[in-house]
Image: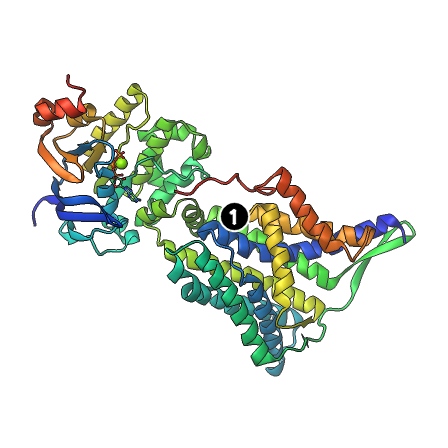
Amino acid sequence: MSDKILEIKNLNTFYGPIQALRDVSLDVEQGEIVTLIGANGAGKSTLLMSIFGNPRAASGEILYKGTNLVNIPTHKIAKLGVAQVPEGRRVFSGMTVEENLLMGATPIGMSHADEDIKRIYEFFPRLLERRNQRAVTMSGGEQQMLAIGRALMGRPELLLLDEPSLGLAPIIVKQIFTKLKDIAAEGTTVFLVEQNANHALKLADRGYVMVNGQIRLTGTGDELLANDEVREAYLGGH
Amino acid sequence: MDSLAIILQQLVNGLTLGSVYGLIAIGYTMVYGIIGMINFAHGDLYMVSAYLTAIFLALLSFFGIDSLPVVLFLTLLGTMAITGVYGWVIERVAYRPLRNSTRLAPLISAIGISFVLQEYVRINQGSNDQGIPALLFGAVRVPVGNDFFQITYSQILIIVVSLLGMGLLTYVIQKTELGRQCRATQMDRKMSGILGIHTDRIISTVFVIGAAMGAVAGVLVTLNYGSFNFSSGFIIGIKAFTAAVLGGIGSLPGAMLGGIVLGMAESLFSGLVNTDYKDVFAFGLLVTVMIFKPSGLLGKPAVEKV
Ligand SMILES: Nc1ncnc2c1ncn2[C@@H]1O[C@H](COP(=O)(O)OP(=O)(O)OP(=O)(O)O)[C@@H](O)[C@H]1O
Ligand SMILES: [Mg+2]
């Protein structure tokens, strides 16, 4: 077996007649932090959602530890060890913080839930303070921490994140990215979708650039940070 | 009669009626909450459960089981189970295939299922009223001044079993893993799937729970009033639906509260004002609440689902 935890090959995904992903191929190695950057509407979220079969890929392969996910029902994918922090966080607004975390344990069952919740509270002390508060009443940054905590409750081997910096103050973004580094250091592979290219490329080992549903560029984080096209389009030309 | 005695009597009657509305309203509200459709066949499931009650009572007496608590318990359990199966099958056959079609399609399908159930029962059981012999006799009389009001044992049974059923369901929904999964699926089905919840199975479970709670109402009312026919589910279904809307459709405590408020209002109006106009009053109450609180007593303001 290769040490590629995720390998996407020639993936095509449609919304009705609209093709959102064109022949996308990329891979992520065990233990890496890989980022995917691209402008609004490039297809980044579609790619992450395709991994969970929603929408289903029309053709191509999504190999997770060698298993093709393309025809596996959505609810079985988390059990294989993939978790997603989706765009817009999607915490369960009417539930408390603790209930949200419990939901994250669904793929592995509740037997480790108590010990894992403690671990998450140590990792995000803010969540402990708010454990009985309904998620809807929390700030954007707290909700983002909750969405990440919820995903970690399933003890994933591969963590997918969709624009965790969206709408957050720079200082909070910095905190969240530091946490992502910690998560990766503990052995979870991180695949990070971002528009905040500067932060993401600095954090990541490698990166991909998506334009109009296609992969345009790839390289190490530093290579992409130095790339003229990337600087022009995503880093404000600085 | 002492007017205080009348009021107390009507409150007892209203609580009885309201518990029944509340039990049936649970099915409407949970199904609406999870898939956003009104299950027009739900009242007919209540009707089916009335027939099942009679069948179970006959079977148990045939086998010589005549201890009243045992008979009641087995009838309740058996009727809930079989009505639950009906609920499960209906969702699988009539609603799930239409899940990704227009919003109207499952509604039409539900109306179709309502006719199917009524005709199926009418053809097999006839269109005459059916009845069962009374099992519970007697009442507790409570003196008020130089008058009294009374609670029959059937009413006590209805109120106690309904409140127990509602309490148990509330516990399951609020405190258990299954309940959390139901709530999560209701709030965000796509995210629930990503978290590993088998959302189709949760939707089926909700149909089974709704049907079973309707069956509790069917058993209790049948034991109390004795008679029913193939169209018995219609009016009570509409009333329970009204209760669900009154309480805030989609909200479980709302359905129970809406049921009890509606039952109380109807009984008090009948007792104190006029019996003929009690339904006018009940629907008038609904309209009034809708004007001032369009999302119902405990409902949340509508938000677009993503
Ligand atoms: N549910 C949908 N139905 C139809 N088209 C969609 C749907 N979701 C996304 N699209 C289209 O697919 C394309 C890719 O969208 P996607 O959300 O994947 O982009 P993105 O890279 O995540 O953008 P953003 O950075 O704004 O989140 C866009 O053209 C979008 O309009
Ligand atoms: Mg996106």
Name which residue lies at 65% across and 47% down. Answer: B286
Looking at this view, is B36 or B14 the one in front?
A: B36
- Residue with the mark numbered 1: B250
Residue A95, x across and y down, in percent: 45, 39
Q: Is residue A99 left or right of residue A30?
A: right
Residue A192, given in percent of the width and then of the height, sits at 21, 34
Up/down of A225 relative to B27, above or below: above
Q: Residue B91, percent across and down?
A: 44, 63
Answer yes or no: is residue B219 visible: no
- Left or right, A155 with respect to A23, comes to right
Residue drawn at x 56%, y 54% as measured from the top left: B26
Q: How is the image coloured?
A: rainbow
Amino acid at pointer 1: Gly
| The quadrant where residue B54 appears | bottom right
For residue A168, which quarter of the picture?
Answer: top left
Q: Is residue A207 left or right of residue B168?
A: left
Residue A101 visible in image? yes
In front: B35, or B221?
Answer: B35
